[in-house]
Image (tube, rainbow, N blue to C red):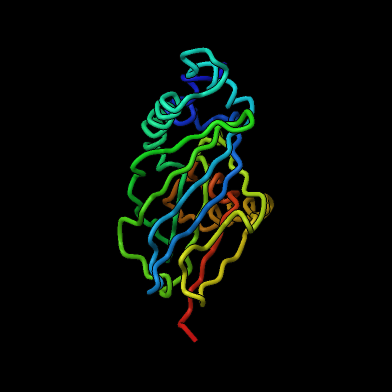
Amino acid sequence: MLGAAALTAIVGTAAPALAHPHVFAEAKVEIVGTPDARLAAIRNVWRMDELFSSSVLVDFDKNANGTLDQDELVEIGTTVKESIAEWDFYTFVETAGRSVKLTPPDMIHTLYEDGQLLMFFEMRAAEPVDLAAGKLTVANFDDTFFVAFDVASEADFQLIDMPKQCTKQYVVPDADAAAQQWMESVASLGPDESLPEDGINYSQALATRIEVSCGPAS
């Protein structure tokens, strides 16, 4: 049964062996920049599926009035923040082949709307990132496949306060391409190297992502 325990289980007890998701979230992402083409922050908005949302309602509706009041929503946000911190808040940014550090959100805001739980929060860049120096990749994913994030269209990735020369590319990976990437990683192993369990991070390889490029201003 999902519920308060599941909010922690989303990240704390889900084993990598899980092969299919148990929680689903519709995701929208804002990539916030600065006028001089630097990364300022990543903003997430997640609409959780109805089954998970109903289980949260059962566990956190302390006064049994059939909805989630403000104090109950704050408690949910606090619980989720503590739970998913270990997993980098399922928010991953890369540039030039390396991960970009983000600061944890001050809080996770929550709403209960039309029978679904919404979560939204901002993570600011913890290091300088010059967007004009190379492509920036942004994605939501869960290494354990316990939570599945659905970014339905390019419109669900928005560039905010970016210089006009910045563009975005919406990328939906192909499962066959991920398999090919795994085979290539195996083929590249040296004689003294062992075969990794996965070869590649499939959750990352299969995650829908946005690629942001900011060339010189024209």
Residue 17 image position (x, y, % from top left): 54, 30
Q: Position of residue 179 (x, y in %)?
A: 64, 50
- Name the residue: 54% across, 15% down: 65
Q: Is residue 19 visible?
A: no
- Say if 2 sits above or below 130 in the image: above
State the residue in front, 59 or 96: 59
Farthest residue toward the bottom? 218
* Left or right for 121, reference 101: right
As drawn, 173 above or below 133: above
Q: Position of residue 33 (x, y in %)?
A: 42, 65
The quadrant in which the N terminus is found is: top right
Q: Residue at x 31, y 55 (%)?
A: 126
Q: In the visual, does 181 lie left or right of 102?
A: right
Q: Is residue 105 left or right of residue 149?
A: left
Along the viewing direction, whichever of 142 and 80 lies nearer the viewer = 80
Q: Is residue 6 above or below residue 177?
A: above
**77 vs 92, nearest the viewer:** 77
- How many labels, in total? 0
Residue 177: quadrant of the picture: bottom right
Outermost residue to the left = 127
Residue 109 in view in this figure: yes
> Residue sitting at 49 percent across and 45 percent down?
195
Q: Nearer the viewer, residue 181 or 1?
A: 1
x and y, in percent, of residue 50 in the image: 64, 28
* Quadrant of the rendered image containing residue 76: top left
